[in-house]
């Protein structure tokens, strides 16, 4: 397709994003609007917005690419991404909403009454957020370069410029409207091409699986020692979801704990439907774009399939739709991350004001953009998987033990987070800098969650037991607040999204 058509698709999505954000700006007046949309977002709106920010470049482009390269082994990614939300539903959603916190560091301070625990949590949230944003910008660079031939860095810069503008303009309330729109755009941008491709194959008498070829092609294993790598990946995805700052901040926007649970249940349905389409496209890619598995461009499978299978004007229109959906994926996830990071940074650096939120949004946007421009594009799903492993090893123990174990102490939480961060960080560093790793050593470095997550939990528990003192009355009050059902308080004039 022509570069002009691709650019038009990108421009339409960006313009729609800005216009919706402007609508949200008219409703954003208070500090609560900017941080948590004044806690008035209803379950369906919030579920759509969560789907918008959670379904990132790894989901939109990376899943199909992984299936092209790794075959059925790659199905653990969509399974893990979705099952992680079941963990949220069961263990985190309602108690976190009842905590009354604005951010994860707020939760740490409310639960542990410790400035040190808050500081460590803040630093880790910012690190996780920046690590997660970089693959989104890499995805934008890849998409723009492949579809238009323009320099890839321009795609990253365009995404971050629009995201920064929309977040600075209206904060969480504005972004809620934007992300809900972007989820349904992403779903349509994968569903419509998938249906058309299958119809085209059926009409022309071609097999969607190449008469079984899709299952017979050679595939690259995700790990060398099979069962260990699979278990480690599942641990990373299940527990990593519990600590993603841009997902968790969404539960603060629900009116009450029951709404947070309903939101999570709806998200599970939406994710299950969404992941059907990249899975089908990945199978088609193994048949009709097998060369991508060898040339390192497997993440472009979704972008290139319509032209390969359909061709002509119809193929170009489908490609334009996919491009628009891809940029919606990059922007929605990035905007959710920037909102969550701006909330944390402004609370700790700028006094929690609206002006401080806006300056923090600019800072939260600039740093990952510089990191993305200075690093090479990695396999998108794999890069996100590494972030999940880091999150599972750091923030997840704080949340789970903070919600469900009265014995957690500030010293234990800090020790566990630092141990997990150090262990996972060293593993990532070794995996990226030591070229001769093989066998079990390679798996331990590239898939560290199976040992770093238990390490973080064990350190947290042992240090908490060693530093346990008389339980303060405040702990009982906080635990009661986390687990006691509540009624939503809403005034007659409260606005609802």
Image (cartoon, rainbow, N blue to C red):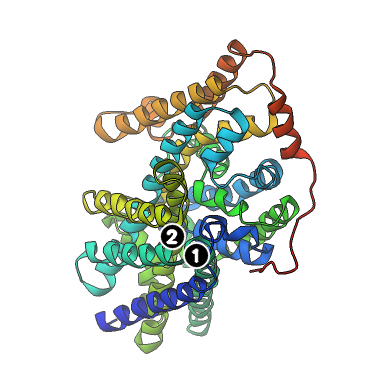
Residue for point 79% across, 48% down: 486
Residue for point 52% across, 55% down: 35
Q: Is residue 318 above or below residue 400?
A: below
Mark positioned earlier in the residue sequence (1 or 2): 1
Q: Is residue 321 above or below residue 51?
A: below
Q: Which residue is mark 1?
A: 175
Quadrant containing the N terminus is bottom left
* Residue 363 falls left or right of residue 492: left
Judge the density around disc 2: few (<14), some (14-19), many (≥20) Cα neighbours within 10 Å: many
Quadrant containing the C terminus is bottom right
Judge the density around disc 1: few (<14), some (14-19), many (≥20) Cα neighbours within 10 Å: many
Residue 149 x, y percent position in the rendering? 21, 71
Nearest the camera: 246 or 469?
A: 469
* Residue 155 falls left or right of residue 40: left
Q: Is residue 219 above or below residue 208?
A: above
* Residue 97 falls left or right of residue 24: right
Residue for point 59% across, 28% down: 112
Q: Which residue is mark 2?
A: 335
Residue 433 x, y percent position in the rendering? 25, 32
Q: Are marks 1 and 2 in contact (CB under 8 Å)?
A: yes
Nearest the camera: 474 or 268?
A: 474
Query: Is residue 216 visible in the rendered structure shown here?
Result: no
Q: CA distance from mark 1 to mark 2?
A: 7 Å
* Residue farthest toward the top in the current orientation of the protein: 466
Nearest the camera: 44 or 115?
A: 115
Nearest the camera: 457 or 77?
A: 457
Residue at disc 1, secondary structure: helix
Residue 198 x, y percent position in the rendering? 52, 76
Q: Quadrant of residue 239?
A: top right
Q: Is residue 296 above or below residue 128?
A: below
């Amino acid at each position: 397709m022509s570069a002009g058509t691709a650019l038009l698709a990108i421009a339409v999505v960006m313009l729609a994003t800005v216009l919706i954000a402007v609508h949200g700006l008219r409703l954003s007046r208070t500090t609560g609007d900017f941080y948590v949309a004044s806690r008035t977002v209803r379950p369906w709106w919030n579920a759509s917005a969560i789907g918008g920010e959670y379904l990132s470049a790894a989901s939109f482009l990376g899943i199909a690419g992984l299936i092209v390269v790794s075959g059925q082994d790659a199905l653990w990614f969509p399974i893990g991404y979705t099952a992680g939300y079941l963990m949220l539903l069961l263990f985190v959603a309602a108690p976190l909403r009842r905590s009354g916190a604005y951010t994860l560091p707020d939760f740490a301070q409310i639960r542990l009454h410790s400035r040190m625990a808050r500081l460590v949590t803040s630093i880790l949230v910012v690190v996780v957020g920046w690590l997660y944003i970089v693959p989104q910008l890499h995805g934008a660079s890849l998409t723009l370069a492949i579809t238009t031939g323009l320099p890839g860095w321009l795609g990253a810069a365009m995404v971050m410029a629009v995201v920064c503008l929309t977040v600075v303009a209206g904060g969480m309330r504005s972004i809620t409207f934007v992300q809900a729109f972007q989820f349904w755009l992403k779903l349509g941008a994968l569903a419509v091409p998938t249906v058309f491709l299958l119809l085209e194959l059926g009409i022309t008498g071609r097999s969607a699986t190449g008469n079984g070829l899709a299952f017979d092609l050679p595939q690259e294993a995700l790990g060398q020692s099979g069962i260990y790598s699979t278990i480690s990946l599942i641990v990373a995805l299940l527990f990593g979801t519990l600590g993603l700052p841009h997902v968790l901040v969404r539960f603060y926007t629900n009116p009450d704990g029951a709404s947070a649970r309903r939101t999570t249940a709806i998200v599970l349905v939406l994710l299950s439907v969404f992941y059907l389409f990249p899975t089908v496209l990945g199978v088609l890619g193994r048949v009709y774009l097998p060369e991508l598995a060898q040339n390192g461009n497997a993440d472009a499978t979704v972008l290139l399939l319509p032209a390969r299978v359909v061709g002509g004007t119809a193929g170009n229109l489908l490609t334009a739709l996919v491009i628009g959906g891809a940029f919606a994926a990059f922007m929605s996830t990035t905007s959710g991350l920037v909102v969550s990071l701006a909330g944390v940074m402004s609370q700790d650096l700028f006094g929690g004001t609206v002006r401080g939120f806006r300056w923090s949004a600019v800072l939260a946007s600039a740093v990952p953009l510089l990191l993305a421009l200075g690093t090479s594009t990695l396999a998108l799903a794999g890069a996100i998987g590494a972030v999940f492993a880091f999150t599972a090893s750091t923030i997840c123990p704080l949340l789970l033990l903070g919600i469900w174990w009265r014995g957690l102490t500030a010293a234990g939480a800090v020790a566990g987070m630092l141990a997990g961060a150090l262990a996972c960080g060293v593993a990532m560093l070794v995996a990226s800098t030591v070229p001769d790793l093989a066998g079990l050593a390679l798996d331990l470095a590239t898939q560290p969650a199976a040992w770093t997550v238990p390490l973080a939990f064990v350190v947290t528990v042992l240090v908490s037991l060693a530093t346990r003192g008389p339980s303060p009355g405040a702990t009982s009050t906080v635990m009661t607040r986390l687990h006691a059902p509540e009624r939503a308080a809403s005034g007659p004039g409260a606005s609802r999204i």
